[in-house]
Amino acid sequence: MSIKKIHLSVRDIVEFVLRGGNIDARFFGMKRALEGIKVHNKVQKKRAAHAKKNKYLYESEVPLKFEFEHEGTLFEVEGRCDGLLIQDGSITIEELKSTAFDVSQMQPNLDHWHFAQCKFYGFIYCTLYEVSDVTIMVTYCELETLTERSFAQTFTHEELRAYFFSVFDAYYEWLALHLARLRVRDDSIDAMTFPHEVYRKGQREFAVAVYKTLVSEKKLFAQAPTGTGKTISTLFPAIKYIKDTDKKIFYLTAKTITKQVASDACHALMKKGLRCIALTLTAKEKICLGQNICTPDQCPYAKGHFDRINAALKDIVLHETLLDRQTIENYAKTHQVCPSEFALELTDWVDLILCDYNYVFDPKVSLKRFFSDNAPPVKHVVLVDEAHNLVDRSREMYSAALSKSDFAAVKRKVKALPLAKITKKLNEYRESMEEETATLPEEFVLLLMGFVPKADAWLAQNEGHDMHDQVLTLYFAVMDFIKIAEFFGDGYVVLFERAGKDITIRLCCLDPSELLKQCFRKVHSTIVFSATLTPLDYFSAILGGEDTDNFLRIASPFDPNNLCILLNDTISTKFRNRNQSYAAIADNIYSMVVAKKGNYLVFFSSYQYLNSVRAIFSDKHPAIRTIVQEQQMTEAEREDYIDGFGAGSDETLVGFAVLGGLFSEGIDLTGDKLIGVCIVGVGLPFVTPVRNLMCDYFNRKEAFTGFSYAYVNPGMNKVLQASGRVIRTETDRGVLLLLDERYKTAEYQRLFPKEWAHVQTVKDDTAALCAFRQFWTVK
């Protein structure tokens, strides 16, 4: 069945058909960074004032939309022209473009996509309002001086119609291949069956809840324990749902390993007959084939990239279905295109995108083509895996900081940039401001906005300068700060952090819920899920939940008797008591690992705590092999750590690791690869000024307990994630040891999952050893 309607943007069509030349970070990157900075607003305001004074009509940001049928498919092409001028019966459509170049040196190029974009708007306007001719005008405006230069030409409606369809026909040659692929995809979705012979316990319930949520265009918060099969339970119904639509599925994760799990699930569906394309997005610095220097004279993949990109797109889409990092790199090498930009281009032509949270939620790097206010009206499906990680990640995304030292070195060596007033203002803050305030420092933000166009011009004119990279780094930091300042309001605080003569201004997002709600409203439907969303009301509140959302708790599919849970509530791991706890903790760890040979993980709240206990443990029990998570580990070192947990070993291995770290979630050690976990402490985040401000903020909100929101709930979530490493399949058996006196309090007991109802309390390592031995003797 054909898709009922295809939504296209004017800019996407003309850029795709008419683009060519190089990627050049000297200007290409600037253009991206300037998104959100309303450079041409001043020009529009000037136009409006002139029109009012001279009594003619001027409108800015005029939406234009044109629907037509072509080859049995309905197309909707839309855009927004920067300006519409109607004077003495003549009509002018204006497109504004900001530039760092001297506009007096520019020449008109009617074949450039800037002019094509304006001609498209002219045709749509003539069609909608039955106008016989219109003047199209492209105006370039210098960022620093606001000097303008316009290029204008009048066209008849028929001339613009012929031009529109000549460009569209060139675009349709590619689009027809895409539509044919979608028809094959939809037929395969019809025939697609669940990839496993039977549903696991709770899996069908989860999949049905996901599908119903998508149909109702709502949001679902779902806690589905390890073993439920969360990935396939969300992907399967989501893929079924997008049949006969041009919606995409965005599968968001916090870790590379989870993206791989999602990719494997896609592969399983494809083995069952699904014909779709799944793309994994990789961070630019990881996938770059050069040296992250995107200039045509330094990178062969940047030079001529836009001359070759369409051929690369066609090649990979016609021949591949799972577009992972290696596949992207291989095709990028074949076609000599930038792999990072290549992958971003592919997002328009695939069905499923596996990526990090920031591609949807981070205002500085999100995929504007899908999630900006000016994006096409198609709303997509978003699946948020490991959603417990989104709490702190979203706070980071909506926060920003600048220090006086960031500006000082540039100020000394680059006299052309206006930094004196900025550093002066920072000195004033260092002398006079309190440690925090709920008021945005607007004077400082205005000074930063004055810096942007001058820095942009300097960067464009001083390529090769020994300070270029440092100015560029400062430029982007300033841009980030300005962008975050736009969101400042309730749920924010400004911190002033002093260190000697230096001062840092930090815009801290304490509560990202309202900002996440804005993101959710730009998508069709969102499924927010994790093995640990306890308590569910906390995660709903902090992640932008609303009264209309759906909620689901899935019980663990595993027999609780396969997990022995012991709690020693006689040990205090509070910071002031830690020095006295090391020996007792080492003894309790030994009671766990000596009861049965095998592989174990022990988690601590800090590296210092870990190393102190590990030293005592190894000194007492040198025959037991241990491995330690280090603070800085390469990918190879991480793999070596995990590889140490081999199945069937005849010796005991104890891995020491940190809560919330690399090995406390996302790893899958089934069977004999891991038979026990010990968790030392309750995982409380470190006490920081920001955490304390969060505590105060949520204390002021009705029915919220600030300390729980800032410390207890995030800490317990780390505990639950780490504990979930033990039982991964229905046949797994293992032990869990909790060490901390706070676990016996009501505040923590209420956060225990139902599957922990059989937890046993022990008072010393001897009692623990007896309990563990008894568990292992029972088959």
Image (spheres, grey):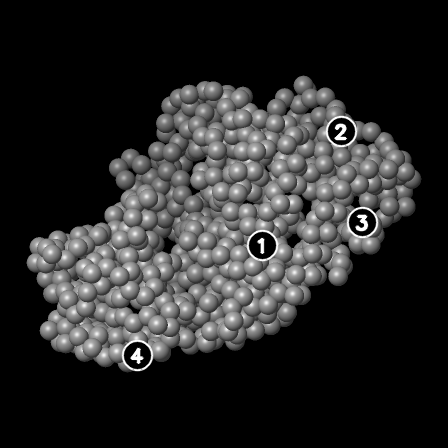
Pointer 1 or 3: first along the chain = 3
Look at mark 3 in the image and give the residue it sits on: 66
Question: Badge 1: how crowded within 10 Å, few (<14), some, or many (20+)?
Answer: many
Q: Residue at x 58, y 62 (%)?
A: 272
Q: Position of residue 721 (x, y in %)?
A: 34, 64
Gap between marks 2 and 4, in whole Å? 72 Å
**Residue 308 horizontal/vertical position (percent):** 64, 32
Q: Which residue is mark 4?
A: 561
Name the residue furthest left: 620
Among the two numbered marks 2 and 4 on one chain, the one whose residue lies closer to the N terminus:
2
Image quarter hosting the C terminus: bottom left
Q: Is residue 632 above or below residue 247?
A: above
| Amino acid under disc 3 | Phe
Q: Is residue 545 above or below residue 763?
A: above
**Residue on which the image places disc 2:** 111
- In the image shown, does 294 or 400 lie closer to the viewer? 294
What's the residue at 53%, 22% (across, down)? 297
Mark 2: which secondary structure?
A: loop
Label 1, on which residue? 352
**Where is residue 662 drawn, in percent x and y?**
33, 53
SS for callout 1: strand
